[in-house]
Amino acid sequence: MTNVTLYRNASVFTGLADRPLAEAFAVSAGRITAAGTLAAVRSSLGTGAQPADVTEVDLAGSFVMPGMIEGHSHLRMLGEALDKVQLRGCETLADIQRALSERRAAQPDAPHVLGVSWLFSALGDERPTAAMIDEVISDVPVLLDANDLHSVWVNTAALAAMGIDRDTPDPVGGEIVRDENGDATGFLLETAAMQYAWSYLESVTSEADEDRYLENAFNVYLETGVTGATDMAFDESLIRPLVRRLRRDGKLPFPITAHWLLRASGDSAEDLAQVATAARLRDEIHAEFGDEWLRINGVKFILDGVIDACTAAMRAPYANGENAAPIWSYEAALPVALAVDAAGLQFALHAIGDAASEMAADLVAECIRVNGPRPDRRPRIEHLESVGTDTIARMAALGITASMQPVHCDPAILDNWIAMLGDERGEQGFPWHTFCEHGVTLALGTDAPTAPHHALDNLFIALTTRSALDASLPGYHPERAFTPGDALQGLTHGPAYAASQDADHGTIAPGKRANIAVLSVNPFTDAPDALRDARVLLTLVDGEVAYSA
């Protein structure tokens, strides 16, 4: 064996909660060759290894883990959001208006102003309107993504740029909010945000913009110890820069798996055509690049909306007496799900409300019944913020992965979420402990940019249920918090399993790709508050330094 790097003097979490920590590991040719005690790792090198062939690195007692795999991300949107006005910290409408005015003053020649992550709570009992933005910017389009990315707030100039008027139809599963006269108010919900706002932004985005957004996302993830990601809104706008980069470099900064975003059209033939497109692109990308760096795993159904906007499908009405129908009806979704499954594509089902997650489980069960059992199916439900215990039990029986985001229950952003439910459901959300008790595989992520992308903030909330944004707030049911082992497994092996990458990723074990994160704190022995100031010291991708502090 030649050119081996032996890392020692570390606490090494190998990726599985029930395994003891190791103290050393070795890497050669981009792969892990051994992990365990220092003596065992040295012994694994064999008597033929000469001192000149082995480089030893003393990690000075640092904590080592498999590189975190972002279980649910929107890479292009994250990279784009990093360039936008950041509104998550704005507590009032005046704060939002001030932030927008400052950006306009700083970039007076910009053709538009884009913002992200405003919270409903900042507007109190009011709904967003174009007039609120027009007060400070009226000469160029302004488009502001809500924190959950399920609605967009725009000004009058943006409505005009998107061509929205009294006669513009609501798309299936979405709404252009209108006043009593039928005029658009400047608030686009669900698929209306996708069809009008997102399409408009794509039309004014250049290749250079696309490449910059992608570079932004890769860089911030590597800085936070992330060495892989599953994109959950894959479309042409992300394929283009990824393919350009693969053709230029032959690789990506880290591997990406992707789910093609299906948009409910109301037309069965069009819906099925989207499935055929996903299968064709999967095969084309595989034929040109293989699976090492980019793979389309499956498709994503957005079955419902979000609780903050009262668009998630619930079994019982919201506090205001309203409820929301699913974006996809079961009757419309079933033939599409069966076609997805028959094509060998994995399906991810966005389901935030308890009625939507029940429907998601029904769809999986019917695919298994019609198409038969298949060991590589690995269906997944995304978010599961308000979910029935009966659905959790069914998920365990059906082998459905729970893809969840601890950062979505940061107490700093929960006030409106709780208020919209208005009853005990507000205290029963995000039941990670129940998933663990039922043995459901958990894949943890951030859903960036709907929440901060920082993996260690995600870990802190998983371990405490406290806020990474406001240290003064109490935790949201701390008794439900993860153990360190379960949380770390959910950030590493869980997403690798969910993406069918576990043969190569997610654990530090012989033969696996040497994708590693080295941290300044040990989640097993240090107080959770230490994670607030934790740093990623080193990120390795295939054994090469991808980030160093």
Image (cartoon, rainbow, N blue to C red):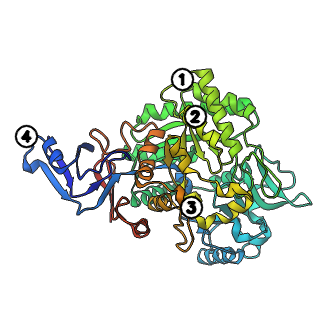
Q: Is residue 335 above or below residue 10?
A: above
Q: Which residue is mark 1?
A: 373
Q: Which residue is mark 4?
A: 48
Sequence order check, earlier mark of 1 and 3? 3
Residue annotated with mark 3: 81
Tell which circle, 2 or 4, labels the residue nearer the N-terminal end: 4
Vertical side of 513 occupied by 471: above or below? below
Q: Is residue 92 left or right of residue 242?
A: right
Asked if residue 215 is positioned above or below residue 331 in the image, the reply reads below
* Image mark count: 4
The mark that comes first in sequence, 1 or 2, is: 2
Q: Which residue is mark 2?
A: 278
The disc label shown at residue 159, or none: none
Q: What is the spatial separation of the Cα atoms under label 3 and label 2, in whole angstroms?
A: 26 Å
Q: Amino acid at mark 1?
A: Pro
- Viewer-closest of 425 and 419: 425
- Residue at the location (32% across, 47% down)? 14
What is the spatial separation of the Cα atoms under label 1 and label 3, in whole angstroms?
40 Å
